[in-house]
Image: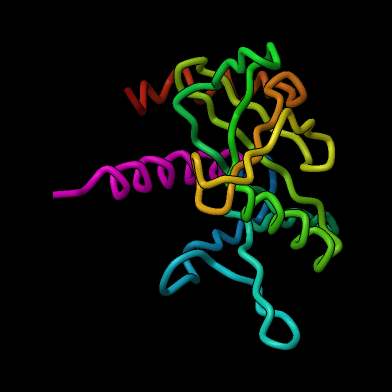
Amino acid sequence: MQNDFEQALALAQTYEALIAEYMRAQGWWIFPTKDYAKNGAPVLLGPNGATLIVPDLFCVRGAERKWVEVKFKTDASFNIIRQRWTMGVARRLWENYFAVREATGLPVELLFWLDKEREIRHARIEDIEISHKYIENKVDFGGSVFVSKDSIPVDLWMTANFTSSFGKGAS
């Protein structure tokens, strides 16, 4: 029997696989980084023993290269103080994605699958507006970064083709 974390991970990996299939249909070659992580998150090994957690997918199409991180969320949260809809990302991962971009010279995109809203949004990390940060361990170990939902465009094709046909993934 799976615990809540294992169930959430399996569900997230299902959505990640769907996004990878979509990208393959668009002519991208996909390297799913999770397939090469024996224990824990996949990492990029750097000089002097440095490591960086890498996004879920490394994508190649001709001379184009990019990283894509798929974030499955049940829904966005409304922040009453800031009067905006937000989505959270672990601060250590957010910082890692920028470090991966700097180390590799390749763009990093965050893709949010919002289940209750039944929409998919994605953008390059540098184009995403940060709403606020929590340094404390309130939500994630090491703090959280909350991004403005409205700063990330809806991918209409993905939304129409995936969220309506796949069914509800979370309660």
* Left or right for 56, reference 84: left
- Quadrant of residue 23 within the rendered picture: top right
Q: Is residue 125 above or below residue 33?
A: above
Where does residue 22 sit, x and y in percent of width and height?
A: 58, 38
Magenta span: predominant SS is helix
Q: With 167 as the anchor, is 89 left or right in this view? A: right
Instruction: Please identify the residue farthest to the bottom as the structure is shown.
Output: 48
Depth check, front residue: 162 or 47: 47
Q: Where is residue 87 in the image (x, y as percent from the top left)?
A: 60, 29
Q: Which of 151 and 24 is in front in this view?
A: 151
Please determine whether, in this image, residue 95 is positioned above or below residue 145: below
Q: Give the range drawn in magenta.
A: 1-22
Q: Which residue is drawn at 34% across and 47% down?
A: 10
| Residue that lies at the very extreme toward the front in this rendered image | 136
Which residue does the image show at 63% across and 61% down from the upper left?
A: 54
Snapshot quadrant of residue 154 = top right
